[in-house]
Every structure is written in structure tokens, then in C-alpha cells.
Image (cartoon, helix red, strand yellow):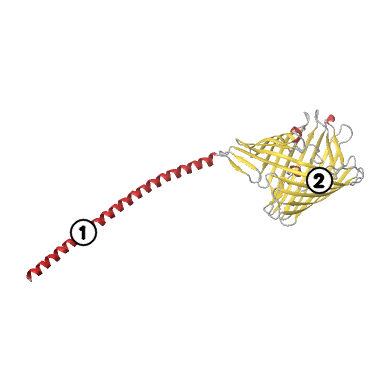
């Protein structure tokens, strides 16, 4: 029995030792497996780090390439037109234009008139900058080809606190004359502009200087009495205009101005005339005064202007006193003035452009804007007792910033002949 118990104890001890050895072998195996897993994980982490570094290099290189592409390529803007600017900003080109399609009908009186349709303006404009110089080339295909249709064609440079302009442009005179045809209140400009007083002399070849501040402008131009398509001559002219706006904020502007114009026919100039279409464009006309080129006489004009935009209401007026020199007899005195205004019917406000000293179109919202307009025009040659007047009532509908419809009813009165022709006119205008 004693030997049996001893044998059993030895068996248990040996079994325990075997179990302990087996357990130790299992732990070693598990540890080895964990070590192998850790080594595999470390290898994967190292591989991932290498991939991340490589991807980072690719991202940096891509970012650098994109930045180089962005800064080294021209910038193109199509808002309201087409504008291309070089990467270094030294070159800029803008392509714009305007189409104005008119329809006329007349209520005839003494003078025969013909209604119909026409393209009032069909312009393409290229403007921009190059090495700090500005340029503009504008062709109006509705006025003719080549030189006949040439409008603004000039180069300009900012210097001495202002801007110098050299080429073919409008002299600094007459507020409504300097206002763009895209933004004038009526379909045609008033008598105190190239529509009457300066007939056929809207654009001249010369040099000008314009300086402007927050509420003032001062401009002076010297020019030859030759349009782009006119014959060479020695006629010369000068014009200057100053403006001041004592009130000018987002909702209210009050503007005053004065201008002077002098034209000397000199040798070889064409006749300088003042002819007024008192019943609208393509309607009857009356010549008020003339200086013949052969006489080598001159025309001098003194003028005052006032305008204001207060909320939805707008007004503008100019008064001009002109003297037409004559070779024989007394000089002819011509007076012309106009008063015009408008009322925005569903919001809107005509903004002021202090850099040029005139008013632009209202900012158009999604709903569009309606504008009621009116104007009275007067012109008289006191020496020859010639007088013409016109009343205009109109409505403008601004569909969006590019599209506008205009309607004008004009009632003309020619005191020379007694004619009282009226005109109905409609314009579709698109500009960009």
C-alpha cells in the first residue's frame, strides 16, 4: 500500500511537471506569434509612412504646378463682357459693344417725313492697358465703315494727378454729350450737344487732360476741327469743363458745372453749322446758325449746367450762350438750353460718376426698373429771329444691366416755318 501511494505521488508530480512544461511551451509560442504580428505591423506602418511621404511629395508638386499654372496663365473675366488680363498684370484687353435698333413713326404737319427702322448704333469696342498706357478702339458699323464709323480711338496715360488722352475723342464740353449713349436719358441728346449746337462735331482729333477727385473734375482739350473721315484743315479748337458736387452720397447727389468751347475755322475748314432736328432723329431739321469755313471766323460758347439725383428722382439742365462770327455784318448770337428729368417708378436710383462728372444708369434688380422721363429743348438765333423747341415724354424699361427698352414721344415746333411735326420712337438697346 505504501508503495502504491508513493507511486501515485510520483505519477502526479511527473504529470504536473509535464503540464507546466506544456504551458510554458504554449506561452513561448504565443509570445513568438505576438512578436511576429508586431513585426508585421511595424513593416506595414513603415510602408504606409513611405507611401504617405511619397504622396505628400506628389501633393506638394501638384500644388506647385497648380500655383504656377494659376499665376502664369492669363485671367479671363466674362462678367458684363470679355476681359483678359495677363498673368503679370501688364496687359489687359476688354471686348464690348452695343446694339441700338430704332423704329420711327411721324405725325406729319408741313414737312414730309419718312418713318421706318434703322440701327442707330452697332459698335464693337476694344480697350485695355499695356505697360501702364490705356488704349481704346471703337467702330460704329451703323455709321459706316473705316473712318466714317470711327468713334473713340486713342491712347491715354495717367500722370501729374490726372489723365492725358491723345487721339480721337469727345472734347470736354456739354454734360449730356459726354454721357455715354448707353446711359443717356432720352433716345437722342438735347440741342446743347452735337445733336444741335455742335452738329457733326462730336469726336475730334487732339489731346486732352482730365483731373478728378471725390467730388470734382477739371478737363481741358485742344483739337483740330477734323473728324476721322474729314478733310485735312488748319482749323483748331479748345474746350474746357469743370464740375463740383457739394452733395454726393449713395442716395443724394447735387452737381454743378461750367464749360467753354472755342472753334476757329482757320484755313480749309468745312462750314461750322448748328442744325436742330426738332421732331426727333430723321425728322425735319432747321439750321439755326452757320460759320463758313471760307470766312475763317470762329464760334465761342459759354455754358452752365446743374443736375441732381435724389432717391428715385433725377433732373438735369444746361444753358449755353454762343456767338457765331460772320465775315460781314454783326455776329450771330445763339441761345440754347434744356431741362430734363425722370422718376423711377419701382425703386432704383441714378448713380453719379465723380471721375467724369455725369450720371449713369440705375442699378437694375431682378424685377427690372421702370423710368418715366421728360425733356424740354429750346434754341434761338436772336440775330436772325430763328427759333425751334421740342417737348419729349418717354418711358424707359431696364430689363437687366444689359438690356433696355426706350419709348419717346417728341412734339416739335419750328417758329421759322410754323411746322409742328411729332414723332413716336421705340428703341431696343443691348450693351455689354
Q: What is the crowding at mark 1: few (fewer than 14 residues within 10 Å), some, or many (at least 20)? A: few
- Residue at x-position 89% and y-position 34%: 329
102 vs 30, nearest the viewer:
30
Residue 238 in which image quadrant: top right
Q: In the figure, is residue 81 to the left or right of 14?
A: right
| 161 lies above or below 371 | above
| Mark 1 secondary-structure assignment | helix
Could you tell me residue 267's position as x and y percent?
80, 28
- Residue at x-position 77% and y-position 53%: 342
| 268 lies above or below 261 | above
Could you tell me residue 407's position as x and y percent?
79, 50
Looking at the image, can residue 189 be seen? no
Q: Which mark is residue 103?
A: 2
Q: In the figure, is residue 77 to the left or right of 7?
A: right
- Residue labelled with disc 1: 24
Residue 155 in which image quadrant: top right
Could you tell me residue 17's position as x and y percent?
16, 62
Quarter the N terminus occupies: bottom left
Amino acid at each position: 500500500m505504501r508503495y502504491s501511494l508513493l507511486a501515485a505521488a510520483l505519477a502526479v508530480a511527473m504529470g504536473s511537471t509535464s503540464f507546466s512544461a506544456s504551458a510554458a511551451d504554449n506561452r513561448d509560442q504565443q509570445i513568438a506569434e505576438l512578436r511576429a504580428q508586431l513585426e508585421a505591423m511595424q513593416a506595414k506602418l513603415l510602408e504606409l509612412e513611405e507611401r504617405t511621404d511619397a504622396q505628400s511629395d506628389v501633393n506638394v508638386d501638384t500644388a506647385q504646378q497648380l500655383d504656377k499654372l494659376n499665376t502664369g496663365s492669363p485671367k479671363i473675366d466674362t462678367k458684363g463682357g470679355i476681359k483678359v488680363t495677363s498673368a503679370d498684370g501688364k496687359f489687359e484687353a476688354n471686348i464690348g459693344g452695343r446694339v441700338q435698333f430704332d423704329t420711327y413713326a411721324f405725325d406729319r404737319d408741313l414737312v414730309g417725313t419718312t418713318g421706318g427702322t434703322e440701327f442707330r448704333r452697332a459698335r464693337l469696342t476694344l480697350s485695355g492697358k499695356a505697360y501702364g498706357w490705356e488704349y481704346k478702339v471703337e467702330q460704329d458699323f451703323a455709321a459706316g465703315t473705316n473712318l466714317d464709323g470711327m468713334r473713340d480711338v486713342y491712347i491715354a496715360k495717367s500722370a501729374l494727378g490726372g489723365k492725358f488722352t491723345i487721339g480721337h475723342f469727345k472734347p470736354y464740353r456739354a454734360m449730356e454729350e459726354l454721357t455715354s449713349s448707353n446711359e443717356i436719358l432720352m433716345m437722342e441728346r438735347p440741342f446743347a450737344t452735337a445733336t444741335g449746337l455742335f452738329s457733326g462735331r462730336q469726336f475730334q482729333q487732339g489731346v486732352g487732360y482730365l483731373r478728378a477727385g471725390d467730388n470734382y473734375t477739371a478737363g481741358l482739350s485742344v483739337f483740330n476741327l477734323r473728324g476721322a473721315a474729314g478733310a485735312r484743315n488748319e482749323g483748331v479748337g479748345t474746350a474746357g469743363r469743370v464740375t463740383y458736387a457739394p452733395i454726393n452720397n449713395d442716395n443724394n447727389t447735387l452737381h454743378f458745372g461750367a464749360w467753354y468751347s472755342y472753334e476757329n475755322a482757320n484755313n480749309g475748314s468745312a462750314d461750322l453749322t448748328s442744325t436742330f432736328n426738332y421732331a426727333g432723329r430723321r425728322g425735319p431739321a432747321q439750321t439755326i446758325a452757320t460759320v463758313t469755313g471760307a470766312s475763317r471766323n470762329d464760334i465761342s460758347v459759354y455754358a452752365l449746367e446743374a443736375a441732381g439725383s435724389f432717391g428715385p428722382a433725377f433732373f438735369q439742365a444746361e444753358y449755353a450762350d454762343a456767338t457765331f462770327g460772320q465775315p460781314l455784318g454783326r455776329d450771330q448770337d445763339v441761345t440754347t438750353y434744356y431741362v430734363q428729368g425722370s422718376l423711377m417708378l419701382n425703386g432704383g436710383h441714378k448713380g453719379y460718376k465723380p471721375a467724369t462728372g455725369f450720371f449713369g444708369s440705375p442699378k437694375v434688380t431682378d424685377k427690372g426698373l421702370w423710368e418715366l422721363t421728360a425733356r424740354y429743348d429750346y434754341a434761338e438765333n436772336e440775330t436772325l429771329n430763328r427759333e425751334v423747341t421740342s417737348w419729349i415724354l418717354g418711358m424707359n424699361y431696364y430689363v437687366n444691366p444689359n438690356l433696355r427698352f426706350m419709348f419717346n414721344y417728341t412734339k416739335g415746333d419750328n417758329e421759322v416755318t410754323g411746322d409742328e411735326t411729332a414723332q413716336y420712337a421705340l428703341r431696343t438697346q443691348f450693351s455689354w
